Image: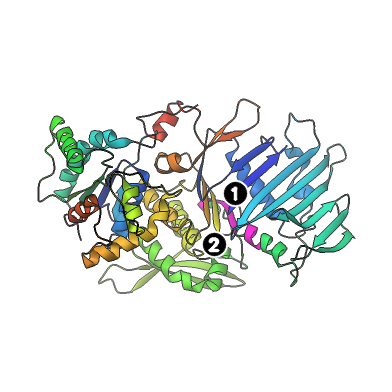
């Protein structure tokens, strides 16, 4: 579970810290920094997932405009089976020369170092916390990301594995193609690659598909199953629906792209819940309520609440929808605020508590500020 | 079109609401059949909020029940009052609003834990409890899952143990028979 995220000198985040629980709802007006927090997380995932260059992931143009410092910092506290990982990254930007380099990168486990990079030198530590090799390394990419798994660095690579289990996404059904050219193990930020991701999870987690189909059938009456049909070098996601009784054929097949935006959103939302429900994923979903009817919101939210802490490790939602606000703001709200061209701030409580009104109504009146 | 909601939970407290919902799921309800009424912004809504909203929900229940079988579950803590006293106040609130309180044949169940839901949870963890003391709260409501499962098992056997169970829980089990599917 991600317990804390810290960012300094990234867009509107200046010396910004967000502490998270199992279930969280990020609340606040437009432009207060909620999605920016998700963006930090997504960028760090990109940075730690391979050979990404630091300037491509964190361009200097996204330094906080009113800050003079060239140093940008990010920190993560990740709890895994009671042990606490602390990841830290400091980037030094040179805007004039359009360059950036890693000033410092480190990973600690329960306060003990597993990896350190500073001044061009990387230091590795074994799983038993003894000093490992020390070597010069590239200033422009993560030294942690490129390490190959070995028997004596399981603790270090476990961090990467667990961090990669965080799904940071918004549902954009218009961008979802029904065609997939290759499997994708991770969902893209706007779920454009949903079908490629489905291809992957339907192979890797076949046991979960039956329940997923059952859940989708509840929200899409007549739904029977999905199938992936060959189409040249690609595969196309087909949706099999039951025919009304007495109507010749037993099933009728639709292309995924023929479904409505709302139906595709529902399929995506139930898929992220049930396709990986025993994999310990964390869901960071930005406005999952878009496109969904009122009748469908509470059942999906209830399913999310039921699974969170059981099969799903953690849920963090951003929403402006009254239905979600009224269910989650009281127990799980993280209230974002920001004055004009000032840094984002967050608190566990609204600035003003309003008794007697639903949280959404209090927000609609601007009385929580 | 998707199936309509069948059971409404009107409850003053998040933990009690979660407990009731999970118990219904154990007893055969589907998640989509249940709707939880949102609490007001203060969070600790209290019995006053339930009293205020109960007449409307009863009216809605009767209107809907004329078309399709519907249930209403009302939850509020007794706190330092008696369970009977709480139910009497609910009755009075309905009367004052010009809405008759539930009749014997209506599928309206009351869950009134005394002292509060934490008393039931402590009992279901195997603690010998009384209905006067305050017992610890869970950090997350969902932590009640094992206690819900335990109550489900015991209520199917129609025997609560350890003896004696909290009288308010015994009464709630009787209330459940009104809505049992």
Q: Nearer the viewer, residue A196 or A142?
A: A142
Name the spot of residue A42 as percent of width and height, x first. Answer: 65, 50
Compared to residue A263, the image places residue A232 above or below, namely: below
Identity of the residue drawn at 18% across and 47% down: B64
Residue A157 part of the magenta-drawn span? no
The range drawn in magenta is A161-173
A168 is within the stretch colored magenta: yes
> How busy is the neighbourhood of tag 1: few (under 14 within 10 Å), some, or many (20 plus)?
some
Q: Residue at x 47, y 39 (%)?
A: A320
Is residue A248 found left or right of A29 in the rendered image?
A: left
The answer to whether residue A240 of the structure is visible from this angle is no
Q: Could you tell me if the residues under marks 1 and 2 are in contact, i.e. CB atoms within 8 Å?
A: no
Q: List the residue tagged with mark 1.
A: A3
Q: Is residue A22 above or below residue A17?
A: below
Looking at the image, tell me whether mark 1 or mark 2 is earlier in sequence order.
1
Task: Look at the image and tell me in which quarter the N terminus of chain A lies.
Answer: bottom right
Mark 1 belongs to chain:
A
Question: Residue A91 location in percent, x, y?
Answer: 79, 44
Q: CA distance from mark 1 to mark 2?
A: 15 Å
Left or right for A265, reference A19: left
Q: Is A4 left, or right, of B42 in this rendering?
A: right
Q: Is residue B173 visible?
A: yes
Of B177 and A39, the residue lying toward us: B177
Query: Where, by quadrant of the figure, is residue A363 drawn?
Result: top left
Toward the left, the furthest residue is B104
- Give percent across and percent down for residue B52: 24, 33
A264 sits to left or right of B98:
right
Q: Which residue is mark 2?
A: A280
Residue under the image location 17 percent in, 57 percent down: B177
Are the residues under marks 1 and 2 on the same chain? yes
Element at label 2: loop
Secondary structure beneath label 1: strand
């Amino acid at each position: 579970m991600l317990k804390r995220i810290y960012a300094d000198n990234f867009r509107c985040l200046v010396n910004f810290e967000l502490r998270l629980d199992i279930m969280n709802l990020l609340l606040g007006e437009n432009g207060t920094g909620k999605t920016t927090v998700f963006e930090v997380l997504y960028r760090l995932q990109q940075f730690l997932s391979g050979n990404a260059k630091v300037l491509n992931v964190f361009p200097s143009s996204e330094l906080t405009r009113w800050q003079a410092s060239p140093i940008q910092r990010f920190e993560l506290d990740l709890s895994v089976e009671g042990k606490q990982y602390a990841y830290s990254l400091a980037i030094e930007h040179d805007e004039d020369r359009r360059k950036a380099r890693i000033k410092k990168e480190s990973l600690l486990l329960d306060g003990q170092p597993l990896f350190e990079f500073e001044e061009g030198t990387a230091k590795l530590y074994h799983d038993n916390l003894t000093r490992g090799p020390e070597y010069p390394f590239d200033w422009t990419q993560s030294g942690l990301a490129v390490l190959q798994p070995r028997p004596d660095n399981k603790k270090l690579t476990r961090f990467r594995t667990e961090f990669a289990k965080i799904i940071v996404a918004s549902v954009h059904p218009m961008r979802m193609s029904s065609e997939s050219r290759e499997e994708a193990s991770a969902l893209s930020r706007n779920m454009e690659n949903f079908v490629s991701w489905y291809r992957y999870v339907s192979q890797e987690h076949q046991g979960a598909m039956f329940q997923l189909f059952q859940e989708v059938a509840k929200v899409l009456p007549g739904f029977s199953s999905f199938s992936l049909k060959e189409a040249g070098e690609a595969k196309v996601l087909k949706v099999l629906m039951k025919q009304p009784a007495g109507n010749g054929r037993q099933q009728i097949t639709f292309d995924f792209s023929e479904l409505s935006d709302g139906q595709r959103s529902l399929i995506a939302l139930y898929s992220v819940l049930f396709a990986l429900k025993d994999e310990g994923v964390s869901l960071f979903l930005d406005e999952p309520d878009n496109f969904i009817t009122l009748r469908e919101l509470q059942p999906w939210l209830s399913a999310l609440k039921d699974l969170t802490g059981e099969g799903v490790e953690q849920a963090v939602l951003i929403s402006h929808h009254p239905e979600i606000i009224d269910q989650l703001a009281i127990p799980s709200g993280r209230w974002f605020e920001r004055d004009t061209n000032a840094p984002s701030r967050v608190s566990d409580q609204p600035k003003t508590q309003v008794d007697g009104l639903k949280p959404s109504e209090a927000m609609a009146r601007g009385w929580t500020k | 079109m998707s199936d309509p909601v069948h059971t409404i939970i009107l409850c003053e407290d998040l933990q009690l609401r979660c407990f009731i919902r999970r118990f219904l799921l154990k007893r055969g309800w589907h998640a989509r059949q249940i709707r939880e009424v949102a609490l007001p912004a203060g969070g600790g809504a209290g019995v006053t909020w339930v009293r205020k909203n109960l007449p409307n929900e009863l009216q809605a229940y009767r209107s809907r029940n004329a078309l399709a079988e519907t249930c209403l579950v009302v939850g509020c803590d007794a706190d330092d009052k008696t369970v009977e006293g709480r139910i009497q106040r609910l009755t009075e609130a309905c009367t004052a609003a010009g809405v008759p309180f539930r009749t014997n044949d209506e599928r309206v169940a009351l869950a009134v834990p005394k002292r509060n839901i934490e008393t039931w949870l402590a009992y279901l963890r195997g603690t010998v409890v009384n209905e006067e003391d305050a017992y610890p709260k869970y950090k997350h409501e969902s932590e009640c899952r094992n206690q819900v499962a335990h109550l489900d098992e015991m209520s199917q056997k129609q025997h609560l143990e350890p003896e004696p169970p909290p009288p308010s829980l015994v009464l709630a089990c009787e209330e459940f028979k009104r809505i049992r599917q």
